[in-house]
Image (cartoon, helix red, strand yellow):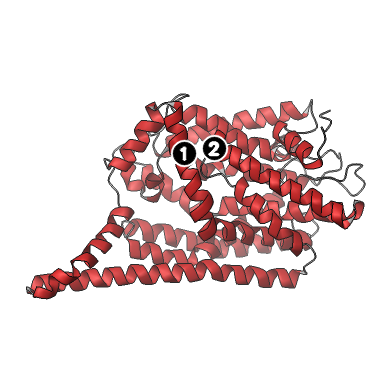
Amino acid sequence: MTSSQSPAPEHQPIGPVSSPDRIEALDITRGVAVLAILLMNIWSFGWPKEIFDYPPLLSHLDGAAVATWAFVHSLFEGSQRTVFSILFGAGALMILGRLEQKDTPAHMKRIYVRRSFFLIIFGLVDAYIFMWPADILYVYGLCGFVLLPMRHMKVRSLIMVTILLLCIPTVIRIMEYQDTLQAKQAHEAALHLAASGNPEQKAVSGDITDWQKKLKDARPGFQDATIQESIAIMQQGSLFQVFKKQAVGSLILQTIVTVKWWFVDALLAMIIGMILFRTGILTLQAPKATYRRLLFIGYGIGLPLSIWETATLINSDFDPLQQAIVAFSYDIGRIAMALGHLAVILLFCRAKGFRVIKEPLAAVGRMALSNYLGQSILCGIIFYSFGFGLYGQLAGYWLYFVVLAVWIIEIIWSVAWLKRYKFGPFEWVWRSLTYGRRQAMR
């Protein structure tokens, strides 16, 4: 990150800046976050979404598949993207503050709006050119516009907004729980009528179908046509077939899912990031005891909730009603776990020494945009048909050998690249587009 004395009035929330006086803790934290987000994304790169939603499907391929899923789900599901979103919110507040110091309000807003707009473009490139439907840059760009008018809000006001935003997914989950409960109750009533020989059973046969559909969606079969078709296309299909399949997924995720879940999910975490930045926690200005408390509170709340959610899903064989029940604690759990993860990383940043680890991670963080997009490119080559075609072939823990390989590549590449250039390649493009002029790379 740039210091207030930086000669250039710009800062990249998820990319590098030119000042040598950066906030290294944010670079390191961002580096860890962009690497760790692959811990979850790798499942979607390597398998249809039904596999992560119902991991017993892989039991016939890998006896440890469910155990691997349980470990990753308990520790990282939701929390890793929350950490990434928190850092984006902090970065947005930082750049807005520095632009306000150096530019007129009108020019500052224009630069920031351009920055958010081009982040949306990067998200579209990631989704449709690099064929990664679960891209988050698109949503981040949209959220960026909302953060602009919030830049001067006090911490107390930001906390109130966070609480209000938490109510939105809660209301949706209450509605989904009621719908699922009613479907199950209607199903049980219909079965009772059928068993009693009551002629009214015909009138409620549709209710049985509704619950059975929910069960089938929650517990698909490995040989289901949808799953097998996805695997066949991604393993052996033409480039156009792969593009078409991924484009359909991207369209659904960037419209229906973004409106229903992703936008509020990301915005909520970004505002928490603004709070943590304002209070000095993310910049290591808080006392060491603060980070210890954050660690114990975060993991003290998040870990039990996450383990309970995971155990409930497995023990109920992913029963739809149980899924609806554990969803109520999901946001609290993922946010708490994310704060625990952040506390661990920030305590590591405060510790003296460990330069051999800190410097490579900081390099990855300075090139977070390039490394995030790089994961789409590398995993596309590894899993899709136009590359090695390993889609649908690596079960459970085998996926994490790919994660390790991608991490090694990105760490080595980031360190080597920044020895020669100021910015990562995609950071340079983003920066140049934002300011409307070619930026110096050296």
Secondary structure under tag 2 reads: helix
Q: Label 2: which residue?
A: 128
Q: Position of residue 186 (x, y in %)?
A: 24, 72
Residue at 53% x, 50% y is 254
Left or right of 147? Residue 73 is left
Q: Element type at marker 1?
A: helix
Q: Is residue 392 left or right of residue 335?
A: left
Position of residue 244 in the picture relative to residue 135 (left or right): left
Location of residue 154 (image quadrant): bottom right
Pointers 2 and 1 in contact (CB under 8 A)? yes
Disc 1: CA contacts within 10 A as few (<14), some (14-19) or many (>=20):
many
- Quadrant location of the C terminus in the rendered image: top right
Residue at point 54%, 58% (across, down): 259
Image spot of residue 392 (x, y percent): 38, 34
The crowding category of the residue bearing disc 2, from other C-alpha atoms within 10 Å (few below 14, some 14 to 19, many at least 20), is many
Residue annotated with mark 1: 246
Amino acid at the residue labelled 2: Tyr
Whether residue 58 sits left or right of residue 303 in the image: it is: left
- Seen in the picture, residue 150 relative to 91 is either above or below; the reply is below
